[in-house]
Image: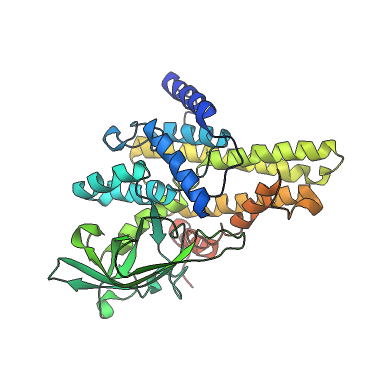
């Protein structure tokens, strides 16, 4: 692995930094999980797209710059360094898009990707269901063939759908097969769903932090045309695993996010130390810096392997997910320890730490619980037997 950036990569960083410094709106920014905040972030995403910074690693025909994965990581570092707003497009551009590039038809790419990049169409994820959270293969939502109209009728309920209260579309799995031969991981199909379609009911779910971006999505005989099936019918599990690899691996949580958090934590520690407090947290702050840098170096190593050998992350994405989710939670716990009695206050300059902590609590749960990820690591990477 060569960690020396080329002149082109350094020039790319300078260009990104200058644009972000000149264009990022002053904070604090509203939460993208509220109606007003979502609209604010969506407008910002459109500014990114107009300047061709929304999806830098995508081909130019879809609104990108054709940048390398290394350059994408560089942009992510600069994005979080600049304190830019949340990416409310993340479920689309970071999760669905890599799967769409890999398995989508040309018609689907032309129809979906430009609108996604420009934040004209934003996506929610429809994985979990009541009774089928971490055990995704236990899902019961169904799709029944409608031959007359050339499509499917979807019925069921999806829950914990991030920002579905405000998004335009949903992607998720539905059971299309019947009988023993289509039990569990078989007989599932990956669909795109218009959240404004007849038969769709979106019910916001209140969160611990008071935001209402999450939602239950109830579907009652919702028609979806054949053109909105991604991959082969009955083979949606393998398609979904491509998406979850992006969710747990490179795309959803880039190192830049945690480098910026670690730097904010150091600044908080120095401020509290000047006040004569926080000295007991010194080693935890150092650990945060080391962990963030270790994750950065590991990610560059992974990208190097992918570029040189065309390798995919596969089960290694579970290691990533365990590491970044537990690191994020540890950083926020350290910040609250530094803040002491004022830690619970969400108003004021330090309020972002409590909001961040409340979200970090979910990190070991979403994208597949860390207990599930440890099973995957044990079985697929270490070769340990199943109990």
Whether 334 is drawn above or below 292: the answer is: below
Residues 106 and 19: in front is: 19
Kindly identify the residue that appears in the image at 51 percent across and 23 percent down: 18
Residue 138 picture location, percent across and down: 39, 74
**Residue 31 shows in this picture:** yes
Kindly identify the residue that appears in the image at 22 percent across and 61 percent down: 232
Q: Is residue 327 left or right of 182 when viewed as pictured? A: right
Residue located farthest toward the front when viewing the structure as drawn: 36
Residues 237 and 190: in front is: 190
The colour scheme applied to this rendered structure is rainbow
Residue located farthest toward the top when viewing the structure as drawn: 7
Kindly identify the residue that appears in the image at 62 percent across and 51 percent down: 356
Residue located farthest toward the left when viewing the structure as drawn: 148
Residue 54 picture location, percent across and down: 40, 37
Residue 230 picture location, percent across and down: 26, 57
Whether 82 is drawn above or below 241: the answer is: above
Q: Is residue 276 left or right of 191 when viewed as pictured? A: right
Residues 30 and 95: in front is: 30
Residue 342 picture location, percent across and down: 78, 51
Kindly identify the residue that appears in the image at 58 percent across and 35 percent down: 26
Residue located farthest toward the right when viewing the structure as drawn: 276
């Amino acid at each position: 692995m060569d960690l020396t950036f080329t002149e082109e990569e350094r020039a790319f960083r300078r260009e990104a930094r200058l644009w972000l410094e000149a264009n990022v709106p002053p904070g604090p920014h509203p939460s993208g999980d509220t109606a007003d905040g979502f609209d604010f972030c969506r407008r910002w995403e459109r500014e990114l797209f107009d300047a061709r910074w929304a999806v830098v690693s995508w081909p130019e025909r879809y609104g990108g710059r054709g940048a390398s994965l290394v350059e994408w990581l560089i942009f992510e570092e600069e994005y979080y360094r600049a304190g830019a707003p949340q990416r409310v497009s993340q479920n689309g551009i970071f999760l669905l898009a890599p799967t769409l590039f890999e398995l989508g038809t040309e018609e689907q790419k032309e129809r979906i990707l430009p609108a996604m990049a420009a934040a004209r169409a934003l996506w929610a994820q429809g994985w979990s269901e009541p009774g089928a959270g971490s055990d995704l293969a236990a899902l019961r939502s169904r799709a029944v063939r409608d031959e007359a109209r050339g499509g499917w009728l979807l019925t069921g309920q999806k829950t914990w759908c991030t920002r579905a209260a405000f998004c335009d579309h949903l992607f998720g799995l539905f059971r299309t097969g019947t009988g023993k031969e289509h039990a569990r991981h078989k007989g599932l199909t990956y669909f795109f769903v218009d959240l404004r379609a007849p038969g769709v009911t979106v019910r916001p779910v209140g969160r611990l932090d008071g935001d209402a971006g999450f939602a239950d999505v109830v579907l009652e005989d919702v028609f979806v045309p054949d053109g909105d099936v991604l991959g082969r019918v009955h083979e949606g599990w393998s398609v979904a695993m491509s998406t979850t690899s992006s969710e747990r691996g490179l795309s959803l949580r880039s190192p830049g996010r945690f480098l910026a958090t670690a730097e904010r934590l150091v600044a908080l520690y120095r401020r509290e130390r000047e006040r004569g407090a926080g000295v007991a947290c010194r080693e935890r702050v150092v650990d945060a810096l080391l962990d963030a840098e270790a994750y950065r170096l590991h990610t560059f190593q992974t990208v190097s392997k992918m570029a040189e050998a065309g390798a995919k992350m596969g089960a290694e994405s579970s290691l990533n997910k365990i590491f970044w989710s537990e690191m994020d939670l540890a950083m926020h716990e350290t910040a609250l320890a530094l803040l002491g009695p004022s830690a619970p206050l969400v108003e004021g300059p330090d309020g972002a730490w409590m909001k961040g902590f409340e979200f970090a609590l979910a990190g070991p749960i979403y994208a597949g619980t860390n207990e599930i990820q440890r099973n995957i690591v044990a079985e697929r990477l270490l070769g340990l037997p199943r109990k």
